[in-house]
Amino acid sequence: MISRVLAVAGVGVTLVGVLMLLVLAAQAGFFGPVARVVAGAGLSVVLVGLGWRVFGRPGGRVGGIALVATGIAGLYLDVVAMTGYYRWVPGGIGLAVALAVALLGVGIAVRWQSQPLAVGVVVGAAVLSPALTTELMLLGFLVVLQAAGVPVQMRRAWPVLHVARTLPVVLAVLGMAAFSGIEGAISGAAAAEQRQGLLVAAIACAVVGLVGALLAVRRRPDDITASITIALTALPVLAVAVLFDRMVSTSITAALAAVLLGLAATALIPRLRATAEIRGNEPSTAGTAVVPDTELVRPAGGLRIARHTALVAALTGAVALLQTCVMAAGGHPRLLPTMLFAVGLAFLAVAAVSRTRVAAGLGIAFALLGGLVTLAIATPETLALQGLAERELDIATAVAAVAGLGVAAMVAWTVPRLPRCDDPALVTSVWIAVSIAGLYYVLVAAVSLGVSLGGADGFIVGHSVATIVWMVVATGSLFYGLRRLASSPAVAKVCLVSGLLVAAAALAKLFLFDLATLSGLIRVTAFLAVGILLLLTGTRYARAFAEAAPPRQAS
């Protein structure tokens, strides 16, 4: 243990010395630039040679690894200095030479089966490279270090190397993006070249992270760290996208979401194919067939993807899609809930077909976000006060409410069809939640359409229509539940509970709000409609239970 601590300390001190030779000596005027670079390269080569010789001797493993790690990192810094500090070498050539040096280092690490050597090379070069260049060229060298670790991850399960080769470039791009955003806010606009360079670096980081993760899990399906790097390398793309105008940023995040969600969707192909086969062979049980999850799925084309990789890709793609919706809405917040509901509806449709709980969870999450945004626009106070309603609500709000109704209905349809989600208590809870959400969306849609199309009395008409619609829905739910009372008691119970709750809400609104707010013929219409529906419902309710009761025996 002590030998390892001393070796690590030696690596750090020696690399700092090489850095001083390359930079501080130049600032002090010691030696010429060529002499400094040659001396640094010579020292690094000597260290690699000594490490190679020491490694083969008894007890020389720790020392050999430390010496070689120091030498390779020193050579890498020498290339960075020639390219980014002295600018003797064109950028493309410098990056190619740096890649060769990094591959040499990780190649020796694979030969010696030493993760510390690979990590030492990557961390040493990444931590000290900013002292030699702080421009976009630095990101290029960090991407090279990230890419150099990909071949190693295909052969060795080295999770620390995954993190060590990924974090430097991710943090560097995020830091430069933040600085560019602040600088742009102060000066009026960020330089176009700086933004484009950051975007290229962010995309390169994401591509290397995605490809490396897929190659790694292809060999080792249990490599969870590789999947996590997909999310890490997507962060710079999301951050850099904010620096561009709305159209460009929306396109960037939408493309990222399409790639990641497309990758996650490949995991659904075998499930859909298996479900179709089951439905074709056993039509009587198609509605309840459940395709078991597998640790590794093989979609068409031979691509293999682990479940955790598909999960990370789906979650990260969903975040990118959320950012796309927010950016696309831009300065029109009333459009945002409709977009969120549309995305939620798409996820729920996928979940209903594939019986995938992850897709259902994402759909419900987008539905909740859309509901919260709608609630922030159409608050209870806004719905209760005519002046606020006329100022805050419009056709876009009505469209959002209708979309919310569609999503609520899809949630009620999808959840009972999911594996291990057919518990009666869960289904009842979902129906109650959907009923409450449906009441709100009906009210928002009616009032929004009323104030947008109904003129001076639109607010009053909207509330009257909402009350009547509530009671119509309650009546329909109760009638349907009564019809299924004998054949499907569980379904009947859910419908009856939901119908009674909606009916109670309609009555409460009728007496607590409509009676005080509505006037004239509109109030009469609301009371008559609700009263007639209550009479019909009560009559049908009594007849249904009378028919279900056993006949009395004659005395």
Image (cartoon, grey):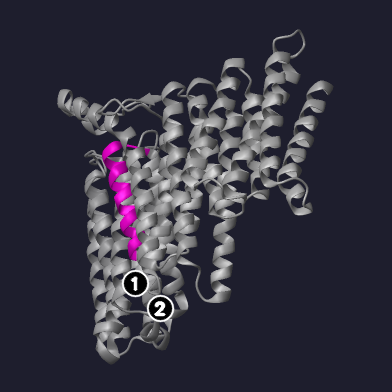
- On the question of residue 375 being in view, the answer is yes
Q: Main secondary structure of the magenta part?
A: helix
Q: Does residue 294 appear in the picture of this structure?
A: no
Residue tagged 2 = 383
Task: Decide whether residue 150 is among the magenta residues.
Answer: no
Q: Position of residue 489 (x, y in %)?
A: 30, 41
**Count of numbered circles in the view:** 2
Mark 1 vs 2: CB contact within 8 A: yes
Q: CA distance from mark 1 to mark 2?
A: 8 Å
Q: Is residue 229 above or below residue 57?
A: below
Residue occupying image coordinates x 43% and y 65%: 244
Q: x, y percentage for residue 117?
A: 65, 25
Residue reaching furthest to the right: 2
Locate the C terminus and report the quarter of the image it occupies. Answer: top left
Read off the magenta span: 338-356
Q: Is residue 221 above or below residue 336?
A: above
Task: Tell me the crowding category of disc 1: few under 14, some 14 to 19, or many 20 or more residues within 10 angstroms, Cα based.
Answer: many
353 is within the stretch colored magenta: yes
331 in relation to 114, above or below: below
